[in-house]
Amino acid sequence: MTRRLSTEQRQRQIAEAALGLISRGGVGSFTTSAIAEEVGLAEGTIFRHFSNKQEIALAAISLLEERLEESFPDEDLPPLERLGLFMRHRLELVIAHRGVFRAFFSDQLGMAAGPEGVARMERIKNKSLQFLRQCLSEARAEGELGSTLAPEFLLRIIQGTVQAFLFGTPTPTSEGEEPPEIARKTWSSLFDLIRK
């Protein structure tokens, strides 16, 4: 006999399914019928756990935010070490789940969740930007940045790198490299630039 899931467990399962669908096919594939099929429920059963599709999108945003929160390292670490841990984790997520992060950065996921979703997505983005600015400013104050590179300039390079993984051609995997190795190599190149 299959164990019945609690409402909280089922909501998380549905949010996971929504992110999976978005990752594979973009926001256009985020339908309640596709979610129901993914989790093995009748479509109407989805609405026992969520009032509407916007609530599912908000739950998906919460799940994504939870994963992103894991990338914020301990504040006691040196600034460039914090920045490196943050960037490697974020790049791994982006490489492994391009579709979800495309929907995130293009605001499609937020719009699917309505005004509350748009506002939450903006807060998530701003928190990450503030973290990057803080690390770069602290590194500048501690003399860890190259003398000619301003923190705001470096911030744009970092953002551009992440967006290249999102919106550029897929990362070549012919060498059999996994996302952690690609993220490590990418950060190593960025680190060399930051230290020049």
Image: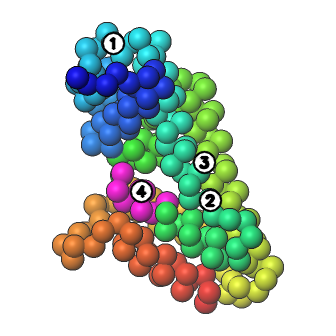
Q: Residue at x 65, y 42 (%)?
A: 123
Q: Is residue 142 above or below residue 63?
A: below
Expressed as whole percent of the image width and height from the top left, the position of residue 87 reads: 53, 66
Q: Calculate the distance from the C-alpha at mark 1 to the C-alpha at mark 2.
A: 36 Å
Q: Calculate the distance from the C-alpha at mark 4 to the C-alpha at mark 1.
A: 31 Å
Tell me whether circle 3 and circle 1 mark residues in contact (CB < 8 Å): no
Q: Nearer the viewer, mark 4 or mark 2?
A: 2
Disc 4 target residue: 94
Task: For label 4, count other residues whose C-alpha is less than 10 Å away and answer few (under 14), some (14-19) or many (20+).
Answer: many
Q: Is residue 37 above or below residue 189?
A: above
Disc 3 target residue: 125
**SS class, disc 2:** loop
Magenta-tinted stretch: 90-97
Disc 2 target residue: 72
Task: For label 1, count other residues whose C-alpha is less than 10 Å away and answer few (under 14), some (14-19) or many (20+).
Answer: few
The mark that comes first in sequence, 4 or 1, is 1
